[in-house]
Image (cartoon, rainbow, N blue to C red):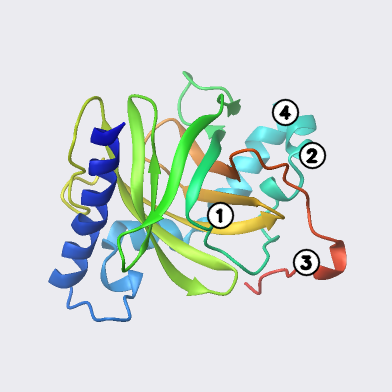
Amino acid sequence: MRRKMVAAMLLAGAVLASSAQAGGSEELDWRRVATSSDRMRLRNWRQAWIEALDHARKTNLDKIVAGGALFDPDRAYSGAIPPAGRYRCRVYKLGAKGTAMAEFTGYPDFACRVGTDGTLPTFYKLEGAQRPAGVFFRDTASRAVFLGTLVIGDERRAMQYGRDASRDLVGYVERVGDKRWRLVLPYPRFESILDVVELVPEGANPVAPPTPAATVMPR
């Protein structure tokens, strides 16, 4: 576990190093750090949602409906960045790339952590052979942008963001309920059209806020 946490802390430094090379300042702007291909992936987030939901609904409409706000691209609340702490996270892959994947795949829960390096909030998957790790950049009241890389196997050090496009990750995080967040990764490099990672604090029972408190993001 200690080796994994070391990798998480190093990851933040790796992304910040990319920021420095891009002429970053105290008020970090993700647009100055993200690669051009990742800016394009994030720019096309709605297209990714439309394509992915179209595929997933054909075979798993009941699961999409049951997910509620988690699978509603236009539902988000203030408080985009989850508080620091341990979370139970679950990955959903919507829309298959190729024939090896189903149109909707939900994986078992895994442990993850939200922390900070003193400058930016960090996110790190603590279990498994493929572990997303990265940082959150504040963007709006209801959205933060995620940039990171994929840590594989027993690697102790996260690769610097921008060095290997196949490892780079881009997405955004939103709060979709009381003690419920989602990390959305449009057009990941492998397997799916859209990945949705649900984040719930360990031991919490997520409940959607009352409808009048909902804030639908302007697009």
Mark 4 sits on what residue? 60
Q: Earlier in the sequence, mark 4 or mark 1?
A: 1
Badge 4, how many Cα within 10 Å: few under 14, some, many 20+? some
Q: Quadrant of residue 146?
A: bottom left
Position of the C terminus, as image quadrant, is: bottom right
How crowded pointer 1 is (Cα within 10 Å; few <14, some 14-19, many 20+) is rated as: some
Q: CA distance from mark 1 to mark 2?
A: 20 Å
Determine the CA span between mark 3 and mark 2.
18 Å
* Three-letter residue code for mark 3: Ala
Check whether the beta carbons of the residues at disc 3 and disc 2 lie within 8 A of each other.
Answer: no
| Labels 4 and 2: the sequence-earlier one | 4
The local crowd at label 3, few if under 14, some if 14 to 19, many if 20 or more residues have their Cα within 10 Å, is: some
Report which residue position mark 2 lands on.
65
Among the 4 quarters of the image, the one containing residue 105: top right
Disc 3 designates what residue?
A: 214
Of the residues shown, which amino acid type is indicated by label 1?
A: Gln
Q: Residue at 45% of width from left, 25% of height from top?
A: 98
State yes or no: discs 4 and 1 in contact (Cβ < 8 Å). no
Between label 1 and label 2, give the one nearer the viewer: 2
The residue depicted at 31 percent of the width and 31 percent of the height is 1
Which numbered dot is residue 47? 1
Vertical position of residue 93 compared to residue 78: above or below? above
Residue 9, x across and y down, in percent? 26, 50
- Cβ atoms at labels 1 and 3 below 8 Å apart: no
Cβ atoms at labels 4 and 3 below 8 Å apart: no
Q: Looking at the picture, which amino acid does disc 4 mark?
A: Asn
Question: Closer to us: mark 4 or mark 3?
Answer: 3
Report the residue at 22% width, 64% height from top.
16
Q: CA distance from mark 4 to mark 2?
A: 9 Å
